[in-house]
Image (cartoon, rainbow, N blue to C red):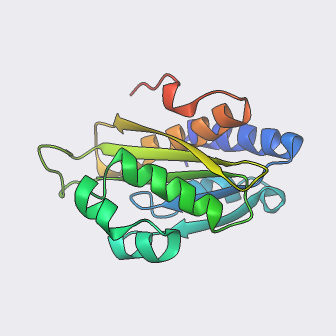
Amino acid sequence: MNEQAALAAEILGSLALEGRHTIATAESLTGGAVSAAITSVAGASQWFERGFVVYTARAKSEMLDVPPELIEKEGVVSLAVAHAMARGAAARSTADLSVALTGVAGPTGGTPETPVGTVCIGWGQKLFDGTVVTAARRINVPGSRATVIAGAKRVALQGLIALIKGENPAGMPCEF
């Protein structure tokens, strides 16, 4: 795991424990890498509730209630689907915070609209009444498949940190 993601996971763990937050992940292009970063932190079982690996459109619909019509209309790599995945991860768990990632890691699979390196990340926060509020952003990570996944993982973790701090993860600085 790269050092930035490892540090972010450590910070996330401290803040989650301090604020009594629990986290769920919904991962497509990262295939569980964000969950792995989180569970590499000793004591993560106190704040990591569960992870969903939803690599296909069907899995997103079945496990997270992402409407198939939304995927068909907006595309699987879209802000709308990232919002829906984050909402579904929070709703389908007891976690109060969630992060969701969908994108094109490459080296193939890109299109002119969603080239390789396109990643949509959604974050969710479950309110006391059970409503889930989401934020999402689209980033472009240049480089190899491993670089795209590592970059997406780092931004996902940093966004959870921002969310805990009361900041909007969709508006945080992001450089590659």
Task: Give the answer, above or below, for where 48 lies relative to 65.
Answer: above
Answer yes or no: is residue 122 visible: yes
Snapshot quadrant of residue 134: top right
Front-lying residue, 98 or 42: 98
Say left or right for 125 vs 80: right
Front-lying residue, 34 or 162: 162
Task: Give the answer, above or below, for where 175 lies relative to 56.
Answer: above
Say left or right for 11 vs 169: right
Q: Pick the quarter of the image with the C terminus.
A: top left
Answer yes or no: is residue 3 visible: no
Could you tell me residue 89's position as x and y percent?
Answer: 58, 62
Task: Give the answer, above or below, for where 48 lies relative to 2.
Answer: below
Please report the residue visible at 29 percent of the width from the left and 43 percent of the height from the top.
118
Could you tell me residue 132's position as x and y percent?
Answer: 63, 51
Task: Give the answer, above or below, for where 54 lies relative to 2.
Answer: below
Could you tell me residue 54's position as x and y percent?
Answer: 45, 69
Please report the residue visible at 64 percent of the width from the left and 59 percent of the height from the top.
90
Snapshot quadrant of residue 34: bottom right
Front-lying residue, 159 or 62: 62
Say left or right for 140 vs 87: left
Please report the residue visible at 66 percent of the width from the left and 52 percent of the height from the top.
131
Could you tell me residue 39's position as x and y percent?
Answer: 69, 59
Say left or right for 104 vs 163: left
